Image (cartoon, rainbow, N blue to C red):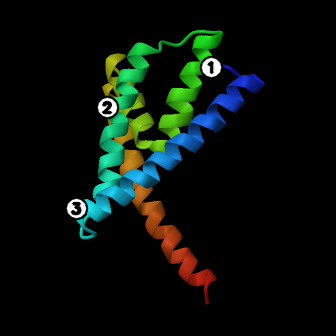
């Protein structure tokens, strides 16, 4: 991992691009497909998973300028676009390492835990708002 100032700048610049892309795609999906289903988020998550798979294959881990480019694309752009793509790549890595129990646990904890904590946060906000 590149912990340098150039790595930090690469992540920040990529994050700005990724977040902007996510926002624009969500707007496009809502205007094209309607508001009755979260098409924007679904599109972002699926496209992000495709792109992170491509990027991970084309930009293997290393050091130097290639490491900074990897940080810009994977952590910055795609991290700003969707963290779901990171979740997909991390799950893939666990499966590739034949760590099926860990992969299953990660998927279950991320989804069930995430939903449970979202509900807890919403409930908590109701208490704080009173």
Q: Quadrant of the C terminus?
A: bottom right
- Looking at marks 3 and 1 on the same chain, the residue that comes earlier in the sequence is marked by 3
Q: Which mark is residue 40?
A: none
Q: Quadrant of residue 13?
A: top right
| SS at circle 3 | helix
Residue 33 — which label?
3
x and y percentages locating residue 31 in the rendered image: 30, 64
Mark positioned earlier in the residue sequence (3 or 2): 3
Compute the Cα span from label 3 to label 1. Answer: 37 Å
Q: Secondary structure at mark 1?
A: helix
- Position above or below: 97 against 24: above
Measuring 35% from the left and 54% from the top, which residue is drawn there? Answer: 41
Q: Residue 103, how many percent across, how many down?
A: 35, 31
Name the residue nearer the viewer: 1 or 96: 1
Q: Is residue 128 left or right of residue 26?
A: right
According to the image, label 2 marks what residue? Answer: 50
Residue 30: image quadrant is bottom left
Which residue is farthest top? 63
Q: Where residue 97 sits: x, y (%)?
A: 37, 16
């Amino acid at each position: 991992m590149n912990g340098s100032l150039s790595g930090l700048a690469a992540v920040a610049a990529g994050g700005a691009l990724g977040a902007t892309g996510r926002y624009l795609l969500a707007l496009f999906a809502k205007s094209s497909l309607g508001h009755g289903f979260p098409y924007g988020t679904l599109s972002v998550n699926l496209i992000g998973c495709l792109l992170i798979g491509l990027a991970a294959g084309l930009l293997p881990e290393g050091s130097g300028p290639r490491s900074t480019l990897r940080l810009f694309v994977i952590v910055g752009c795609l991290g700003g676009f969707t963290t779901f793509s990171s979740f997909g790549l991390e799950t893939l890595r666990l499966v590739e390492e034949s760590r099926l129990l860990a992969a299953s646990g990660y998927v279950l904890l991320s989804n069930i835990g995430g939903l449970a904590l979202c509900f807890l946060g919403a409930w908590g906000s109701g208490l704080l708002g009173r």
